[in-house]
Image (cartoon, grey):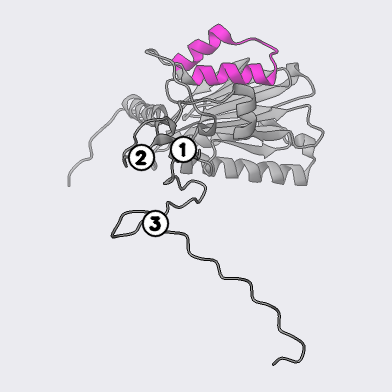
Amino acid sequence: MSMPFYVSPEQLMKDRADFARKGIARGRSVVAVQYADGVLFVSENPSQALHKVSEIYDRIAFAAVGRYNEFENLRIAGVRLADMRGYAYDRRDVTGRGLANAYAQTLGTIFSSGGEKPYEVEIFVAEIGDSAADDQLYRLTYDGQVADEHGYAVMGGAADVVAGHLAEHYVEGASLADALRVAVAALGHTESEDRVIPADALEVAALDRTRTQPRKFLRLRASRLEEILGVRGAADPAAEDGPDANGGVGQHQSGVDDPNDPTDQVSGAVAPLEDPVTGEPPVAPPVAPPVAPPEPGDS
C-alpha cells in the first residue's frame, strides 16, 4: 500500500493562497470611493448582463472580482440572509457588518477546508448611514479576512497601481461627478500610459443617501456617464473621410448623404439605370393622359 505524499500545513495554506491570488489578479479592478452623499462603485466591465456590483438590501451593496460563478453564489446567499433576517426581525437589523461577518465565516471555512479549492474572489460590502460619518465599507479576501476601509479601496487586477493613483487624487467629501472622474481616471492609469475607457465599457453604481426611496442603490447608465465624463474613446476610423476596405468612402458608413454622388444610397436614392447598348440614361417614359370619368348610365 503506497503512502500519500506529506505536505506541511504551512505549505498547503501558502499554495492555496497563491492559487486564489493569481485567479483574482486576472480580473479587472473594482474601485469603491466614498463621496459626500454615499459610496460609489466603478469597474471596467463591457458585459451588460454579468454585473460585478449589485444590491443586497435597502442600504447595502455588494461588489466582487474573481470567478463570476463563485461570487454570484455569495451574492445570492447574502440576499437570502438579508431577506430572512429583515422578515424575521426588523429591516433595521440587517446591517453591513453582520453580512460581512457571515461572508468572512463562509470564505474562511472554504479556504481552510482541504476538500475543495479556495474561492478565487474578493468582495466589498458597503452600507450607508444618515451621514457620511456613518458609512461603512468592508473588504473581504479569499481567506475570510475582513478589513474596514475608509475613503477608497481597490481590489482585483493591478490594484496597487490603481490605489496609488487614488491616493494622489482622492478628495474627501467630493461630489458624485468628481468622485466618478477620479475613479475612472484611476482605472485607466497604468505604469506605462493612461487609457481612456469608453462609457459603455464601465459599470457604475452607487449607494445614494439623497434618494427618497427606502432603497438607496442605483446604477448609472452610459447616457448619464457621458453627461458627466463627456464623449470618451477614439472615433471610428471608418467614419473618417477616405477609402474604406470596400473601396467606398468612409462618410457613407457614418450615415451622411452626398447629394453630388448619384450612387449614394444612404437615404435610399438609387443610381439611374443605363441603356446597355448606348450607355446613356434612358429617356423618361411618356406619361399617359388622365382617363375621363365615365358618364352616368355607362356600364
Pointer 2 or 3: first along the chain: 2
Farthest top residue? 168
The mark closer to the camera, 1 or 3, is 3
Label 2 sits on residue: 248
User: SS class of the residue under badge 2?
Assistant: loop
Find residue 227 and report its image quarter: top right
Real-space Cα separation, disc 2 to disc 1, in angstroms: 59 Å
Find residue 102 and report its image quarter: top right
Q: Residue 273 carries which label?
A: 3
Q: Which of 45 and 99 is in front in this view?
A: 45
Label 1 sits on residue: 110
The mark closer to the camera, 2 or 1, is 2
User: SS class of the residue under badge 3?
Assistant: loop
Q: Is residue 72 above or below residue 100?
A: below
Q: What residue type is labelled 2?
A: Gly
Real-space Cα separation, disc 1 to disc 3, in angstroms: 74 Å
Kindly report the secondary structure that dominates the magenta region of the rendered protein. helix
Left or right of 109: which side holds 176? right
Magenta extent: 160-187
